Image (cartoon, rainbow, N blue to C red):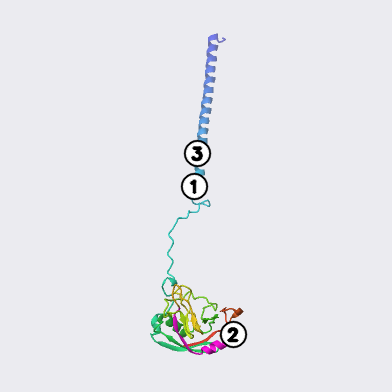
Amino acid sequence: MAPTRQEREAREARERLKAYTARQEVHRRQGNRRMRDNVIVVVGVVVVAALAALTQIAYFTAGPGKAAPSASPSATSTPAPSASAGRNVGAPDPSVAEDRTWTGSITLNAVNLRISLNGAKAPQAVAGFVTDAKDGYFVGKTCHRLAQNTDFGIIQCGSIDGKGGADPSYSYGPVENAPSDNVYPAGTIAIARAKDDGYSNGHQFFIAFVDTKIGSDAAGGYTVIGTVTSGLDELKSRIVAGGIAGGSSDGAPNVATTITGVTIK
């Protein structure tokens, strides 16, 4: 028997409902999938951003992009006291001079100069000279300077480098036994030093071969340690008479001059 009209309409209604329900399910599933995909994308973006941030932090705090630390100001250290600040460097005790007169000789080339040193008036400087003589410092050192004019005449010897250089490990002061009138009579043996620095006395000494006037400076005069008691005329005739290099009034002697011997007792 053929279905009635009501039965066909009921069946078609059920089929329409079934189709609608199926479409709704598909739509729901698609929505859920889109939401899940969106969540995954968002989470992925957040993770990537976090990783990027961590990478940058690591790069600029521990890796090759680490910035150099900025310099911070600091107090300047106080330099150690220098010889010119008022202390001796490597100098012997003044007691070595024994508060007495020392005698001996200085030989320049073949010129023998007899000498007398006053350990009572210049104890520190005489102690230095006596120690240098006993240690053999002077032998082989040169006389690098000869200077002469109307009221000035000296020969200077004993530099560490043969050119007038000071020994950085040896200096002392203050000035002792300097003449009050700035005159160093012929035969005077005195210690050379730097201008205005009373603590720059060292190995170098000069011998005045004529009465010589040397003005005082901020440190005073020059320490007189003693005198040449004989041989001065021979010094003048055999070395000084040869003149000064380049015809100057102050420079190296034309007659190359070396300390060949020093005795002291």
Residue 129 image point, x, y percent: 45, 83
Say few, some or many: other residues with alpha carbon within 10 Å of mark 3 (under 14 / 14 to 19 / 20 or more): few
Dot label at residue 164: none
* Mark closer to the chain start, 3 or 1: 3
Classify 234 as above or below 249. Answer: below
**How many angstroms separate mark 3 from mark 1 (CA)?**
16 Å
Dot label at residue 242: 2
Q: Residue furthest right?
A: 246
**Along the line of sight, the residue nearer the viewer: 139 or 106:** 106
Which label sits in the foreground, 2 or 3? 2
Amino acid carrying label 3: it is: Val
Dot label at residue 46: 3
The answer to whether mark 1 and mark 2 are in CB contact below 8 A is: no
Judge whether residue 13 can be spotted in this image: yes
Quarter occupied by residue 198: bottom left
Dot label at residue 57: 1
Amino acid carrying label 2: it is: Gly
Q: Is residue 24 left or right of residue 219?
A: right
Identify which residue is drawn at 49% across, 47% down. Answer: 57
* Magenta span of residues: 222-238
* Mark closer to the chain start, 2 or 3: 3
